[in-house]
Amino acid sequence: MKSDAAISRQDVESERGMTFSAGPRNLLTDVAGIHVGNADDARLKSGTTAIICEKPATAAVQVLGGAPGTRETDLLEPHNTVETINALVLSGGSAFGLDAASGVQAALHEKGIGFEVGPHRIPLVPAAILFDLINGGDKDWGRYPPYRELGYRAANAASAEFAIGSTGAGAGALVAGIKGGLGSASTVLPDGTTVGALVAVNAMGSVTVGATRHFWAAPFEIGDEFGGLGLPATMPDDASGLRIKFRETASAQQNTTIAVIATDANLSKAQTKRLAIAAHDGFARAIWPAHTPFDGDLVFGMATGANPDPPPVEAFIDLCAAAAATMARAIARGVHAASPADGDIFPAWSNYR
């Protein structure tokens, strides 16, 4: 049994906290075994992002929004048989965007990648979509929507380096008052474990404090990765007020923030789901309000197992905390990186005053 002095020293060390650092790219792909590709159409103001696993990865999902749009998410539940997947898809286009997963599946099938059943290989590609149909883009695409081809292009473009901001699944994203975007961030824990987040930010709520340019995620910022403004010196009177996208119109249902949280740790399917649950706290830290009835807020969890030793309980607690902080940073980075374009109905953060 430890002495009182030893326990006291341990408590002091715990209270001092733990500092995290970003990975070399500050992207989801700092997690070994993952590549990401984007494809989008400027006229459409929409696009798709493909997350490709070099080897099958353990996966799970947690949905906390009230209006999700998904494909193949049931197989990710811990009590179901298949443990691993080959890719994930985040897409614009509302329900039309679910076609993007077919394009990613086709690209993987051409490469002979997939779940082996007898002589067949079936690529397992869960997907989630956000609503970006009414954002100033031309959605008159004719008989078939373009998302299958966008998914195919995104899968074939997948690499360790990829753009954030107004690209891929974030190409047409909006939040309250400003453009949303595709964001990503990574964290390296003191034990060397890496966690990364990728998120298409299209929330009903606001990512900034009141009418200011300060991000709600500011306490978690590393360096000046999304402007370095910190929180306001004095919180504005409207900080707790609800800024809701399209609140006065029927368009208030046009939202959803969809994301991936991934790690190189060796996690079970149940632990991977717990990681996805923890990452939702990053939504709540970066968006006000989050998880509304008209958001389809969803987080996919992934564990590549590139770091083969399962984490002990204490390390898993740190990993879950890092997941939330990394997700909050990724949300702010996506909005910060958004760029203005012709036909926009909201300004980019860079033009917002």
Image: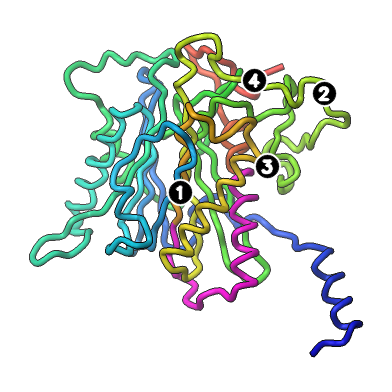
Q: Nearer the viewer, mark 3 or mark 2?
A: 2
- x then y, percent, for residue 64: 49, 41
Is label 4 in contact with label 2 (beta carbons under 8 Å)?
A: no
Amino acid residing under circle 4: Arg
Q: CA distance from mark 1 to mark 4?
A: 25 Å
Q: Nearer the viewer, mark 2 or mark 1?
A: 1
Q: Residue at x 74, y 30 (%)?
A: 214
- x then y, percent, for residue 87: 33, 52
Q: Quadrant of the N terminus?
A: bottom right
The answer to whether 76 is drawn above or below residue 339 in the figure is: below
Q: Residue at x 45, y 24 (%)?
A: 172
Give the mark, 3 or 1, whose residue is nearer the N terminus: 1
Residue 303 in the magenta stretch? The answer is yes
Residue under pointer 2: 236
Q: Residues within 10 Å of mark 3 (few under 14, many from 20)?
A: some
Residue under pointer 1: 62
- Residue 230: image quadrant is top right
In the image, which disc is placed on residue 243? 4
Which secondary structure type mostly characterizes the magenta part of the structure? helix
- Name the element at disc 4: loop
